[in-house]
Image (tube, coloured by chain):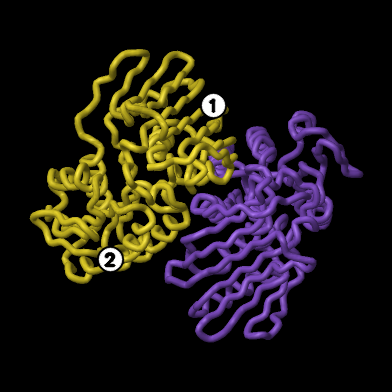
Chain colours: A yellow, B purple
Amino acid sequence: MKRIPLALAGIGKIARDQHLPAIAADPRFELVACASRNATVEGVRNYPTLEALLAAEPRIEAVSLCSPPLPRFAQARAALAAGKHVMLEKPPGGCLSEVRALEEIARTVDRTLFASWHSRHALGVEAARTWLTTQDLRSVNVRWKEDVRRWHPGQAWIWEPGGLGVFDPGINALSIVTRILPREVALVSSTLSFPSNRQMPIAADLELFDTAGVPVHVEFDWRHGPQELWEIEVRSADGALLLSQGGNRLQIDGREVALGSVHEYPSLYSHWGGLIDRGERDVDVRPLSLVADAFLLGRREIVEPFID
Amino acid sequence: MKRIPLALAGIGKIARDQHLPAIAADPRFELVACASRNATVEGVRNYPTLEALLAAEPRIEAVSLCSPPLPRFAQARAALAAGKHVMLEKPPGGCLSEVRALEEIARTVDRTLFASWHSRHALGVEAARTWLTTQDLRSVNVRWKEDVRRWHPGQAWIWEPGGLGVFDPGINALSIVTRILPREVALVSSTLSFPSNRQMPIAADLELFDTAGVPVHVEFDWRHGPQELWEIEVRSADGALLLSQGGNRLQIDGREVALGSVHEYPSLYSHWGGLIDRGERDVDVRPLSLVADAFLLGRREIVEPFID
């Protein structure tokens, strides 16, 4: 099968750490060109903007976007309008209506839009999902806490409207929760802690229930360290599940579960290749929708200023 | 055709002004009972809670809910779980995930869930929609301004998280916009004005674009009076449309368009009856999703305190 000529836009930390190695190892994609304002990638053609890339590289069939969510929308629109398949880093947009707009364009041009959630491809997620289908659930506790200075040094955009604040990592947890739980969850209350000098929250506490009444408690905090805590604990009538290390370690009733070896980004690209081959789209906005709900219902508390 | 035995819950101003007269005039529904903490309706059986009503009135087949959005969720869940068809006043929930949860329950019990948007049934809306399908759009301006003291006197819940603030009337405009425009709209920026003593905004300014790049500017303000302004103006390459009086008056190129005579709430109940007869659901969350987006992207400004 012919390899799909691919462009990657937004060459930052996530592109170098994850996307470039995953693409290099994937037999379905051939990286042809990159677009980034300041950075270049060796061995491929480089352009300062995606628009320039699209104009110069008509052979490209697919574009993977890992720029921040706000500039990414215009890039996704341009790539779809040029008839390319598009993969979006998480979150798929700065807001829900952006994603609806992209879906409408993707339908019109009949191309594959993939709103990726890398944490859903963590090693323990599918095994957790399978086990949970057999259980009578009692409670879910999500703790997703890290040091913003370690994980987002100097990222000013993350504190601006659209940057999501502590929900930028927290949405990874919500992408797992909405994948592994057997029923829909609804938000009933939300408390957001805003540093007095910032537009986005540094911590959040959410109370949800699933449609059978099972409570789901979520704690996000960016003032945690030095070791990050990325874990989801589920108690059922007969046992307990702990998904930790961002979804990559799974324990059931205290026993380690043996997991596969295909990591998050290789699994993402493999999934996207399959979607393109089958002419399908995969756009699940529920994680972003829960974040929007947390802002909509959020009781705002002002906390001490955050100085980067 | 047998009339559908109906219960109405939440007997406040909107129930008395709109729902009761519309139900009385509708040949498909028979009002059997009402539930309300403090109020009663003459000529039917009355209960203090919907739960008590559902337990005592097994013959009821459909429940219309016009309580405020936060208590309404538990009522909707209880009504669906008891196997009743449900109509929700606008907004259909305090947040988007509540509506997804209700949809899941409605699918499970195979009953009709109707998330109503009364302003979509205003006299001029369908004629506006039809005209707009023929036009090359240039710009859309939405001005939805009223005096909160006149329209929401003493409604403390409207200022609490989940109460939507100025989006409580504003969502009516968004329900019309998402109905009449031919393409999806995406929010790109939002400015929210919060009184220093309130959790919800008193004014909002939104910038959106449709997928063809047409700008949509939205102004919501609760500090406007004495006469309310509820209008949507659309300019196209060849003409201009003005939908005013909340959707009930339509002018095209300055000329008055003659409209039908079926008003908002009679049209809502007629639509719901049809959905029940055909075994369909009608849940469009886009107006609420745009409000959630406005909070998510919202740049927060603090304005003078609001004293009711």
| Residue that carries the numbered disc 1 in the rendered image | A215
Chain identity of mark 1: A
Residue A52 lies, in percent from the top left, at 22, 69
| Residue that carries the numbered disc 2 in the rendered image | A83
State yes or no: discs 1 and 2 in contact (Cβ < 8 Å). Answer: no
Badge nearest the viewer, 1 or 2 = 1
- Say if A4 sits above or below B110 in the image: below
Q: Which amino acid, by three-letter code, is at mark 2?
A: Gly
Residue A219 relative to residue B59: left or right: left
| Residue shown at 64% from the left, 54% from the top | B303
- Say if A91 sits above or below A186 in the image: below
Q: Tag 2 or tag 1, which sits nearer the N-term?
A: 2
**Camera-side residue: A170 or A159?**
A159
**Camera-side residue: B117 or A139?**
A139
- Say if B217 sits above or below A41 in the image: below
| Residue shown at 51% from the left, 35% from the top | A185
Residue at the limit of the structure toward the right, as seen here: B42
Residue A283 lies, in percent from the top left, at 38, 49
Q: Which amino acid, by three-letter code, is at mark 1?
A: Pro
| Residue shown at 85% from the left, 37% from the top | B38
